[in-house]
Amino acid sequence: MLSRLFLHYRTMPKIIGTHSGHFHCDEALAVWMLKQIPQFKDASLVRSRDPAKLAECDVVVDVGGVYDPEQNKYDHHQRGFLETFDADHKTKLSSAGLVYKHFGRELIATILGSSEDDAQIQTVFEKTYNDFVESLDANDNGISAYPSNLTPLFKESPTSLPSRVAKKNPAWNEKLSDPEIDARFVAASDMAGEELKDYIMSLANAWLPARKLVVDALERRFEIHHSGRMIALEQSCPWKEHLMELEKERGLIDDKSILYILYPENGPEGNWRIQCVPTRPEGFENRKSLPEPWRGFRDNELDKIANVDGCIFVHAAGFIGGNRSYQGALDMARLAVEM
């Protein structure tokens, strides 16, 4: 009899609790994240504000006025709550940020089918918070991305993730039953979760491989030129963000920073590009533009001016150029560094 009771206790599904009524993106995503990890994979959901019902839950998010990881309670509305992702962040966490902070590494490892000990998990964990979750924390806590004295030139699109989750709520003049609203919440939770999952998968499938290409190129920079101020990528990929983060990590600043990136357009045997590194990822001001006498010229005329064979062009703004071979692009970069 006792063994049957013990087995029944062990196999009872977990219960995730959150508040009933109007819902937001943070708890919708928090619930989805919890349901992805093994501990809560088959958990049922209770939406209520009744303390007695919430007390029966194994984990409670966005309600209850308590933040206590030991008790699996993750609310952020209580007076005095100031928790952030870490010491480097200032944005107060919502229930999404709280659940992500404590379960995010496990979530990512589950989605990617890898171990939490994988070094890349921490990189994806930090990147996902910075680029995906933090804005949701700010949105739910009423934190503006800009100073309040700025007047926007236009309205933001109503297609942000918090806006689309909000639209799942009943309209002000729409009468729905509690079960119908709960079903809307589940749909919103799945929608938010799928976006997070897609983002994490894109990091694993595209962002991390690009980062590896930049890491490998940085390791070989002195093989490219004795100055160490240019790198050659094995193939074209998004590199600006990776390069600037890696330079910061490695102390490659001032006269150690990278000035030019070489990369093939369509495989190593095709045309090559030489591109200047901007002072910031989204800017157009370069650390060192290509030489002014080259700008706006093409083909044979540029060959003569630069004294390099195989030139294709140098943009009039001096931020990018091309050559028909790797050696030609390398010669252009070498001359640009030394001029």
Image (spheres, grey):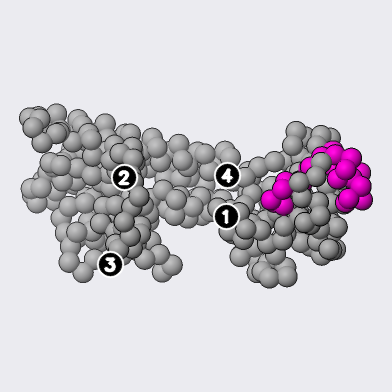
Check residue 207 for magenta coloring.
no
Q: Residue at x 33, y 40 (%)?
A: 157
Total marks shown come to 4
Q: Nearer the viewer, residue 253 or 293?
A: 293
Tell me the amino acid under the disc marked 4.
Trp
Q: Residue at x 61, y 54 (%)?
A: 284
Q: Looking at the rendering, in which quadrant would you find the N terminus?
A: top left
In the rendered structure, which disc, 3 or 2, sits on the residue that comes first in sequence?
Answer: 3
Q: Is residue 150 visible?
A: yes
Per the rendered image, the range of residues in magenta is: 299-324
Q: Secondary structure at mark 1?
A: loop
Q: Is residue 194 above or below residue 133?
A: above
Tell me the amino acid under the disc marked 2.
Lys
In the rendered structure, which disc, 4 or 3, sits on the residue that comes first in sequence?
Answer: 3
Q: Secondary structure at mark 3?
A: loop
Q: Is residue 186 above or below residue 39?
A: above
Q: Looking at the rendering, in which quadrant would you find the C terminus?
A: bottom right
Residue at which label 2 appears: 155
Tell me the amino acid under the disc marked 1.
Gly
Within 10 angstroms of label 1, few (less than 14), some, or many (20 or more) residues? few
Residue at which label 4 appears: 207
- Label 1 and label 4: CA atoms lie apart by 20 Å
Residue at which label 1 appears: 283
Q: Is residue 92 above or below residue 45?
A: below
